[in-house]
Amino acid sequence: MTIKRVKFTSGLKLPENKVTEHMPVARLELPSKVILPLQQHFGQQCNLLVKKGEKVRTGQLIADSDSFISAPIHSTITGVVSSVFKMINPLANSIVDAAEITASEEEELDFQSVNPVLEDIRKELGSLRENGEIENYLSGKIKELFDKINSIENEEIIASIKNAGIVGLGGAAFPTHVKLRPPEDKKIDSIIINGCECEPYITADHRIMLEYGMQMLIGAYIFYKVLNPEKVYIAIEDNKEDAIINIDSLIAKSGLADNFCVVSLKSKYPMGAEKTLIKNVLKRKVPMGGLPMDVGVVVNNVGTCKAACDAILKGQPLIEKIISVTGAVANPGNFIVRIGTPVSEILKCCGEFRSEIREIILGGPMMGNDINEENFPVTKAVNCILIKKGLPRNEGNCIRCGRCVNICPMNLLPLNYVNFVKNSKFEMCKEYYISSCIECGSCAYVCPSAIPIVAYIKTGKSILAGK
Amino acid sequence: MNGTNKENITENNAENNVLDDSKVSDTTVGAAKDNIIVRDNNFISQSPHIWRGISSAKIMYIFLASLIFPSVAAVYFFGLRAFWVMLASTATAVLVELIIKKARKKRFKMDGSALITGLLLALTLPPRIPIWMVVIGAAFSIALAKEVFGGLGHNIFNPALAGRAFLAICFPTFMTQWYLPGNYGVDAVTSASPLSENFIFQGTNMALYRDMFFGNTAGSIGETSAMLIILAGILLIAFRIIDWKIPLVYVATVVIMSLIFGEDILFQVMAGGLLFGAVFMATDYVTSPVTGLGRIIFAVGCGLITFLIRRFGAMPEGVCFSILVMNGFTPLIDRYIRPKPFGYMKPQKAKQAK
Ligand code: SF4
Ligand code: SF4
């Protein structure tokens, strides 16, 4: 077997609450409108290419940018651009332009062209309806498919991935094509496919690995082909044993066992954070302020792999993604939703319980953002909608217990940031390496005085950035 | 946000994309005016949205519960008198905290820290100290050693130890009159504490160790029983209330020093307030460093100073002052002992890598 098990790791044991773990992914009906912020990724904001009142088709490019670190935005439904406005993007704490598209009756697809060698596969895939059929079809043809992918130029693949607007779907939303084009002097020897999903509640990646395993693997193969590393590690936490077994058998079936291997990791938070993940899988430490590339690694999320597979095989841009809707809703589950679907429409389908103080959290409970605005859309970075009863948190004095220091995966001294930010000593924050903080929330989670340390850190960071 | 509000947004978008939200908070308006969907900032909670239930108050109460062991021993060995000392001390501590909080118009939150300070102070006092002195000591602890600095979390010195040191300086005779357990009548027999120079024990070494282990010896009311203190320490470590590094390293340092200077190791460890100080006093969160390495340095410092005072100083016992001295060094230790952040590289090396 090709499963590599990593036994000892430090980190936080969180209550998992993964209630939607066994719920198959369902497709939500198309939304009546979508709101598409023009910056859903890390990097430059895109410029709108369509005008108000213009008709757009599903998959049509509506915004793009010249900048290298950016990803284009596509219309995710067929309809009319009904308005263009500005909105606050709580995920990036900034103000962005956004376009609203109101759906019309018929859905018309405007997908990209695929490479001629894959044309027949695209046609056949188009005729398949059920996901199970697609998976079977792909595993039947896997060898032939890999050959075909191998015959395509790297440049062309990277271009298709860029044009499809694919970004890291794990939450950071870093444009994927940037990761596929490392600088000359950096040799990439390993790819890690991140299937950890260490946050409680979220199960979207878990379901992808179970139901879309083949497509995910093909995506991983595409990255493998472009970067040509020695090894591809698929890192999965050991609370998802079924996914580990499934992926492992798929690897064996597609004859990739030489270069691909599953790594089973202890489920400890924050395992899925890039830096801790690389440390646990490869025992390498990404230098402070550096990127995984600096240690020869590229990390991609499983959802990103699936999106890459869709883009290359079907020419489908990133218009939909799988998210978990969970917490205080009547029908929690995992759903394929179109990007830009307002949260309110999703909640309508899931029957939210109403309670006085509640939070709508985009993302997991540890790092997600409370939006408290049902009209906010699901963007490319969102992988979960969590409805929680809001709990009051009575902040006390720091008693200097050192729990936050002990737990911090980045070896920082979180308690000091609280002090510095309260006293406006932002320069001191820098001296204590505030920029190394990955905002994982571990420190605030263990703090007995219930100090929202991460909130202080974010404030400190944004003020430092504004200076 | 409720349903009507949501419709508002949609309508406005359709017309002119202007949203006139009356609930907009001032800061948001300041940041950006028209044309924006603004969220009502009131309910926004910050990540993480879950956290572990153990609160400061709970930690304090577990700590307090562990203090029951030496307290019970105190009453067992020194009788009701010990009980009155403890009661006077804790009651004064809580009362003074209440008065100060009220005077400053701050919310008084019962977090148990004043209780702990009061009880800790009492346990380090000799059994027959006059009650009015206890009251003065406790009041000093809370008012001058804690609240003056800004209350829980801001004090530099361990309040209980500061109170004890204050008493030891003001009333040296009363603070060094020790009594053998059991003698709490009017004509109680004074006895030297084991660490004093004129201490004479008639019996074998084994019997001495046994008495000291179980607590049948002269000393402060809560400090005599090594066994119960060790038990409480193990419980506190098991519940992860205190860091094992401080008591272990502290005691280990004293052991090593005793070896070097040829002192009786078991005697040095069990005599006086060493165990009590190592388990209950030096581990105080507020006045000890926050990093692991810092804590080790702190504990080694405590151990060295304790031993030096015992061996060369004018006073027979040095635990109290050694911890206070190291408390004073804590801000310095925390300033200079910082863990290297994940992936840290020396500045020159980082440049080379670039
Ligand atoms: S300081 Fe940052 S990296 Fe460290 S635990 Fe807190 S949020 Fe995580
Ligand atoms: S966990 Fe909270 S109380 Fe403890 S040192 Fe950190 S900030 Fe202070």
Image (spheres, rainbow, N blue to C red):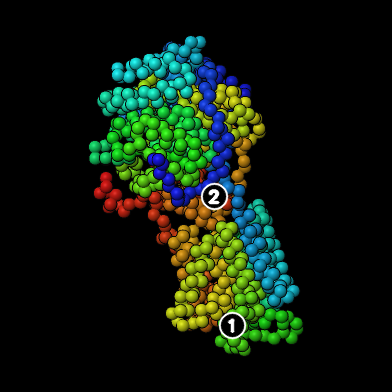
Q: Is residue A449 left or right of residue B80?
A: left
Q: Position of residue B63 (x, y in %)?
A: 62, 61
Which of the pair B189/B108 is nearer the observer?
B189
User: Any mark on residue A301, and which?
Assistant: none
**Mark 2 surroundings within 10 Å by alpha-carbon count, few (fewer than 14), some (14 through 19), many (20 or more):** many
B234 up-or-down from A189: above or below: below
Q: How many discs appear? A: 2
For the residues bearing labels 2 and 1, Cβ distance under 8 angstroms: no
Secondary structure under badge 1?
A: helix
Is B129 located above or below residue A108 in the figure?
below
**Measuring 40% from the left and 26% from the top, which residue is drawn there?**
A139
Give the percent coordinates (x, y) of residue A381. 45, 31
Ligand 2 within 8 Å of the CB at mark 2: yes
Please identify the quarter of the rendering in which residue A252 is found: top left
Report which residue position mark 1 lands on.
B206
The C terminus of chain A lies in quadrant: top left
Q: Quadrant of the N terminus of chain A?
A: top left
Residue A446 marker: 2
Q: Amino acid at mark 1?
A: Met
Classify mark 2: helix, strand or loop. Answer: helix
Tell me which chain the residue with mark 1 is part of: B
